[in-house]
C-alpha cells in the first residue's frame, strides 16, 4: 500500500505539549509543594494545630481524589479545550476561597477545591491534551514534558513564600488565583486543539493516509479491560504509595527542615535542587519506559525513595539537606511511566 502526503501545516502536537506543560506547572498552588509554605502562617493565624491542618488537608485530598473519575468522563465528553478553560476558571475560584478561610471547616473546603481542581483536574486535563496527540512516541514526550513541569513547578514554593513575606498568606493566595486565571484560561480557550483529526493531522505527526487505507490496530485498552488486569492494580498501588509518602514529606518540609536549622525561605528553596534530579528522570525514564519493562523502573524508584526516607532523622544544613532534597526525584518515576507504559498493550491471543 502506498501513502500520500497532504499539504498540512506544522504538526500542532508540539504546540500542545508546550501549552500543556505550562498549564500543568500552574497547578503548583494546589500541589503539596505550594501548599507547604502556607502551613505555618495558617497555623499561627487560624489558631489551629498542625494535626488539624494536616487533617483538613487529608480530607481535601481524599474528597478531591474521589471526584476525579467523574472529571475524566467529563473531559472525554466535552474535550480538553473546553475542560481546561472551565477547570482553570474554577481552580482560580478555589484559590480565592483559600484566601478567606477562617477555621477548620472552611480550610477543609478550600483544600478540597484546590486539590480537586488544581492538583487533580488541571493535571488530568493537561495530560489528556497531550495523550491525544502522541502514541508511538508518548513515553519520550511525557518524559520531556514532565521534566519541564517539574522545573517550572519547583519555583512555586519560592515565589509563594516571597509573596507571603512581602504581603500576607491571604494575599499570596489571591495572587496565585490571578496568575492561574491569566495563564490557564487563555491557553485553554485559544491554544488547545482537542485531537489531530480536528485539524486534518494524525498522532505523532504521521502523514495522512490515502483514502480507503485503514490505520494500524488500536492497542489501547478500555477501562473495563484495564481494571481487570493485575498489572493495573500493582502499578496503581505503587503510584498511590509514592503519592502518600511524598505528599506527607512535602507538606511538612518547611517544618522538617526548620527543625534541621533552616529558615522558611531556605527550606522553600530546597525544592529547587529537585529540578536537577527531575531533569535526569525526565530525559532518561521517559525514553526507557518505551524500551524496557516498567516494573524494573518502579523497583529502582522505590529503593531510592526508601533511602530518602531514612535520611530524615539525620539531615543537617549543608550537603545532607541538599542530598535529601534531591532524593525526592525518584518518587516521580511512577507518575512518569504510568501513562505511556508500553505494558498497557492488550494481551492478544497468539502473542
Image (cartoon, grey):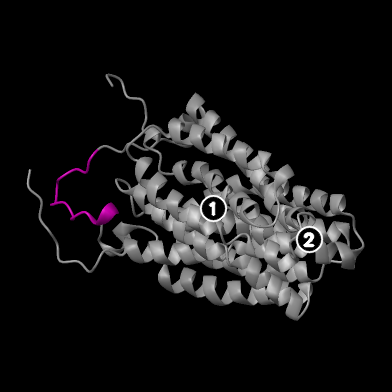
Graded by Cα atoms within 10 Å as few (under 14), some (14 to 19) or many (20 or more), the crowding at tag 1 reads few
Percent coordinates x, y for residue 196 in the rendering: 31, 58
Mark 2 vs mark 1, foreground winner is 2
Residue bearing mark 1:
74
- Quadrant of the image occupied by residue 255: bottom right
Percent coordinates x, y for residue 273 in the rendering: 56, 59
> Relative to residue 133, is residue 322 drawn left or right?
right
Percent coordinates x, y for residue 193 in the rendering: 38, 64
Q: Are marks 2 and 1 in contact (CB under 8 Å)?
A: no
Q: Quadrant of the C terminus?
A: top left
Percent coordinates x, y for residue 139 in the rendering: 37, 46
Mark 2 and mark 1 lie on one chain; the one further toward the N terminus is 2
Residue 204 forms part of the magenta stretch: yes
Q: Nearer the viewer, residue 233 or 323?
A: 323
Instruction: Give the residue at x 66% y 62%.
Output: 34
Instruction: Give the residue at x 75% y 68%.
Output: 97
- Which residue is situated farthest in the front direction here? 318
Segment colored magenta: 202-216
Amino acid at each position: 500500500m502506498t501513502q500520500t502526503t497532504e499539504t498540512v501545516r506544522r504538526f500542532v502536537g508540539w504546540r500542545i505539549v508546550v501549552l500543556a506543560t505550562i498549564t500543568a506547572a500552574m497547578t503548583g498552588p494546589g500541589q503539596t509543594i505550594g501548599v507547604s509554605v502556607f502551613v505555618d502562617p495558617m497555623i499561627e493565624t487560624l489558631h489551629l494545630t498542625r494535626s488539624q491542618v494536616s487533617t483538613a488537608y487529608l480530607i481535601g485530598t481524599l474528597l478531591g481524589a474521589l471526584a476525579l473519575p467523574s472529571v475524566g468522563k467529563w473531559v472525554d465528553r466535552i474535550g480538553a479545550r473546553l475542560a481546561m478553560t472551565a477547570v482553570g476558571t474554577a481552580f482560580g475560584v478555589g484559590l480565592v476561597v483559600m484566601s478567606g478561610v477562617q477555621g477548620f471547616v472552611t480550610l477543609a473546603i478550600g483544600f478540597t477545591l484546590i486539590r480537586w481542581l488544581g492538583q487533580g483536574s488541571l493535571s488530568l486535563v493537561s495530560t489528556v491534551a497531550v495523550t491525544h496527540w502522541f502514541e508511538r512516541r508518548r513515553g519520550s514526550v511525557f518524559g520531556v514534558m514532565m521534566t519541564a513541569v517539574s522545573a517550572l513547578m519547583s519555583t512555586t514554593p519560592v515565589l509563594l513564600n516571597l509573596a507571603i513575606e512581602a504581603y500576607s498568606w491571604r494575599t499570596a493566595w489571591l495572587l496565585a488565583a490571578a496568575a492561574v486565571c491569566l495563564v490557564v484560561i487563555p491557553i485553554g480557550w485559544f491554544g488547545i486543539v482537542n485531537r489531530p483529526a480536528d485539524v486534518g493531522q494524525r498522532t505523532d505527526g504521521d502523514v495522512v493516509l490515502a483514502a480507503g487505507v485503514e490505520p494500524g490496530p488500536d492497542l489501547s485498552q478500555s477501562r473495563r479491560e484495564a481494571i481487570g488486569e493485575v498489572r493495573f492494580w500493582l502499578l496503581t498501588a505503587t503510584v498511590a504509595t509514592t503519592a502518600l509518602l511524598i505528599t506527607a514529606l512535602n507538606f511538612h518540609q518547611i517544618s522538617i527542615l526548620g527543625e534541621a536549622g533552616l529558615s522558611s525561605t531556605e527550606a522553600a528553596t530546597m525544592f529547587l535542587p529537585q529540578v536537577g534530579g527531575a531533569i535526569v528522570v525526565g530525559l532518561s525514564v521517559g525514553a526507557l519506559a518505551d524500551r524496557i519493562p516498567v516494573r524494573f523502573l518502579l523497583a529502582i524508584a522505590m529503593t531510592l525513595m526508601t533511602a530518602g526516607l531514612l535520611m530524615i532523622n539525620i539531615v543537617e544544613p549543608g550537603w545532607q539537606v541538599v542530598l535529601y532534597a534531591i532524593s525526592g526525584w525518584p518518587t516521580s518515576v511512577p507518575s512518569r511511566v504510568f501513562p505511556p507504559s508500553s505494558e498497557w498493550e492488550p494481551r492478544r491471543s497468539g502473542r
